[in-house]
């Protein structure tokens, strides 16, 4: 009997060791895996901070031009309707736009933005749209050059741009960046990722323009944008997502996708 008990104990210990060896160890700050890519707590905090900075910059710019419309007001004006006349798809578009640009984010909203960025980026790389860090630097430099050339000879526009640059630089400094250029240089990898996704989105827009039911005016942009959100969630549902931190959960905002996996090369 003693021999049998010892044998059972040895087997239990051996199994425990094997199970322990089979468990994957993740960094302490890991929140989730998206097809093996880790999203961290620090990335979520950074997303929230960057949104606060973007909102502060927007408010500074609007202070120079108080008649500027909010994103929601601009959409309503483009549609030439009242807020009460917005249909569900138009409301969804506005909510998505605000969540992506002008809304203070909760931790879970920031997490879901990062989830989608990860899945869009992975798909864009698979579809051969990858922009390297070197290319991203070159694109930003060229864009800056074009912007400066456009202001040449227009003293009023140049003065206004200098004023805008001055007040937004104050905001960047509050967030420990010397300037917009310093901010962009420090997050150049993020810019390269955004450009990669943007290239695929351009191709997506062409494909969906041909496939979606025809609509008029600004409604076309709304339909395509909502479809992009739906496609992101379709990709997310196909992905291997593992949430490691119970503080966070995947949220779905869109509608079921019926077009399948698209060829966006």
Image: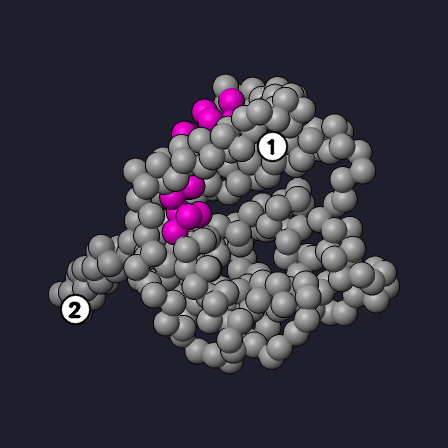
Q: Which residue is mark 1?
A: 53
Label 2: state its secondary structure.
Answer: helix
Viewer-nearest of discs 2 and 1:
1
Picture coordinates of residue 62, whole percent (x, y) = 73, 33
Nearer to us in this view, 206 or 226: 206
- Decide if residue 30 is in sight here: no
Crowding near pointer 2: few (<14 within 10 Å), some, many (20+)?
few
Picture coordinates of residue 192, whole percent (x, y) = 38, 43
| Residue bounds of the magenta highlight | 179-196
Counting residues from the start of the chain, the first of labels 2 and 1 encountered is 2
Q: Which residue is drawn at the image coordinates 62% and 46% (left, top)? A: 101
Decide if residue 76 is on the left or right side of residue 36.
right
Vertical arrangement, residue 70 with respect to residue 252, above or below: above
Q: Are marks 2 and 1 in contact (CB under 8 Å)?
A: no
**Distance CA(mark 2)–CA(mark 1):** 67 Å
Decide if residue 259 is on the left or right side of residue 110.
left
Q: Which residue is drawn at the image coordinates 66% and 44% (left, top)? A: 102
Q: Which residue is drawn at the image coordinates 57% and 34% (left, top)? A: 49
Decide if residue 69 is on the left or right side of residue 102.
right
């Amino acid at each position: 009997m003693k021999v049998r008990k010892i044998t059972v104990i040895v087997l239990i210990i051996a199994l425990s060791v094997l199970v322990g060896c089979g468990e994957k160890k993740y960094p302490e700050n890991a929140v989730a895996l998206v097809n093996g890519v880790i999203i961290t707590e620090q990335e979520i905090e950074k997303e929230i901070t960057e949104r606060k900075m973007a909102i502060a910059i927007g408010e500074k710019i609007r202070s120079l031009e108080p008649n500027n419309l909010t994103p929601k007001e601009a959409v309503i004006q483009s549609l030439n309707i009242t807020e009460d006349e917005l249909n569900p798809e138009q409301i969804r578009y506005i909510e998505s736009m605000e969540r992506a640009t002008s809304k203070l984010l909760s931790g879970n909203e920031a997490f879901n933005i990062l989830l989608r960025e990860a899945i869009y980026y992975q798909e864009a790389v698979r579809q051969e749209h990858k922009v390297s860090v070197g290319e991203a630097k070159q694109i930003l430099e060229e864009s800056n050059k074009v912007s400066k050339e456009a202001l040449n000879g227009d003293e009023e526009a140049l003065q206004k741009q200098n004023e805008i640059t001055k007040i937004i630089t104050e905001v960047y400094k509050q967030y420990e960046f010397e300037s917009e250029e310093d901010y962009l240089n420090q997050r150049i990898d993020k810019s390269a990722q955004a450009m990669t996704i943007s290239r695929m989105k351009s191709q997506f827009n062409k494909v969906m323009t041909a496939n979606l039911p025809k609509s008029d005016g600004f409604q076309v942009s709304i339909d395509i944008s909502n479809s992009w959100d739906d496609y992101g969630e379709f990709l997310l549902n196909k992905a291997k997502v593992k949430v490691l931190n119970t503080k966070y959960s995947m949220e779905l905002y869109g509608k079921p996708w019926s077009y399948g996996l698209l060829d966006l090369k």
